[in-house]
Amino acid sequence: MSAAMTSDPRATQPKYQRIADDLKREIDAGRYRPGDRLPGENDLMATYGVARMTARQALGVLKDEGTAEARRGVGVFVREFRPIRRRGIQRLSGRSWGGGASVWSADIASRELTVDQLSVAEREAPERIAAVLGLKGGEPACVRSRRFVLDGKPVLLSDSYLPAALVAGSRITDQDTGPGGTYARLAELGHKPVHFQEQIRSRMPTGDEAERLALAPGTPVFLVHRTAFAEDGQVVEVNEMVLDSASYILEYDFDA
Amino acid sequence: MSAAMTSDPRATQPKYQRIADDLKREIDAGRYRPGDRLPGENDLMATYGVARMTARQALGVLKDEGTAEARRGVGVFVREFRPIRRRGIQRLSGRSWGGGASVWSADIASRELTVDQLSVAEREAPERIAAVLGLKGGEPACVRSRRFVLDGKPVLLSDSYLPAALVAGSRITDQDTGPGGTYARLAELGHKPVHFQEQIRSRMPTGDEAERLALAPGTPVFLVHRTAFAEDGQVVEVNEMVLDSASYILEYDFDA
DNA sequence: GATCCCAACATCTCTAGACAAGCTGAAATC
DNA sequence: GATTTCAGCTTGTCTAGAGATGTTGGGATC
């Protein structure tokens, strides 16, 4: 979507998007600095010859992104803290505050974390997963369910879903975790995951979860729902994880 | 139903907001479930007697929140992965952070997250905080404790620690959240935070936390420990937060 | 000098249309 | 029966206005 932006400005791109891009470009170039006033609705109407709603929509893009903020009766201003480039590193560390054993880094290289239960199947995914993966009409998914242990203690349940069509005929189903695991295989198939989104919830475990993770009573679990996107924006994997909150802390780094 | 629309006994609320609230209420009540189709633009125009742009704006509120998604040519649907059951969920995404009205960004700005309890003091910080901040020998920290409410429900407790020497004489202690908040002030003082690290834990709340957040029994809390670094690597702020896990989902985006 | 009022200006809300673009299902065709 | 076409639905984009509401600064008043 954004690829066509720079390469083909003539392509049917909404006016409001073009105006928003122009503004962002000028901000990036330092023409407008944090705290500066941006052209307002009236300015954009005059400059670009568009209607108020269109100018508003353009400014709305910047507002939604957090790049700009409007002060009613005053004007639109560049915000002090612009959106980050979301280049975070994901780490799942065991215990201790200052960062102890990093068991999971960006390249998903696992150290002491090992798999002790594994099942692979091709079947229909739950509705919520299928929707995210873009599977229609009972199209099957490749499902890998795993349990991970750390120092002999089970700490993580993971269900990984991939579109079956994506991995048809490959040996991805046999792959274990590790540097040469799922993601490397996806890359070989031309579907290298380059962007990730994680949603984290917390709740009390179900009876089954408590048993499989050998949880002490009163220990909540993390639910991590990760979506992996390829370069073209396609969802190539959905991973649902249940983590023992007594064994894990989640760590994220990012820049302003 | 439309009778209530015409007269506004309470403060005049925008039509689009009222319509959006109606929809959200019905979703919360289970009248529309995830995956269900919502009334579209035409439906809302007919039901509420508003123009298309107004109906669109109402649906835009749900879209921005992540409650609903529109499929062009098809309709508007309740999302599978809603931020949360109830309406007050926030995204604490990396994206949001940097964009932030100091702390929370665009999302929250449009969603009435307000401070309802505030205390500022200069005192010694707990050991673990003082260590991270690099304070020695009882050097004091500036501590801002806040409780945030969303739609009248308390959802977040926040303790922010800054080296007192860093903010001596400034009015940072008076600042509230918002565009000109703590981070903007730090930037003015030459200690602009540029890098962040977050550690997330989950556990059952203490009695005090449960009371202050009005938690339902069996609801765990998130603990977010955020460290903010300036350009030179110095730690300029430590923020410890307790979040109602029933009201919040944490969301992170990152690239490989 | 201090206070109040107000006009100018900004964003916000809303209208009543219009056409474009994408999806779906049914009818027509092969 | 299988395929293609197309009408009718949907959301997306856009216009040219209008009034409401909030902010600001200057001028008149006290």
Image (cartoon, coloured by chain):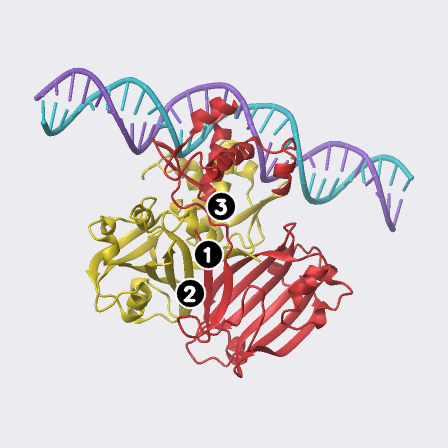
Chain colours: A red, B yellow, C cyan, D purple
Q: Would residue B14 be found to the left or right of residue A6 on screen?
A: left
Instruction: Identify the residue at image location x=51%, y=74%.
Output: A206
Q: Which residue is mark 3?
A: B64
Q: Residue A251: percent from the left, percent from the top?
A: 46, 65
Three-letter amino acid code at the position of disc 2 = Gln
Q: Residue D15: percent from the left, percent from the top?
A: 54, 22
Q: Quadrant of the C terminus of chain B?
A: bottom right
Three-letter amino acid code at the position of disc 1 = Phe
Q: Residue B218: percent from the left, percent from the top?
A: 40, 70
Cα–Cα gap, marks 1 and 2: 12 Å
Please tell me whether mark 3 sits on a helix, a strand or a loop: helix
Q: Residues within 10 Å of mark 1 (few under 14, many from 20)?
A: many
Mark 3 chain? B
Cα–Cα gap, marks 2 and 3: 27 Å
Q: Would residue D28 be found to the left or right of residue B132 on screen?
A: left
Q: Is residue B1 visible?
A: no
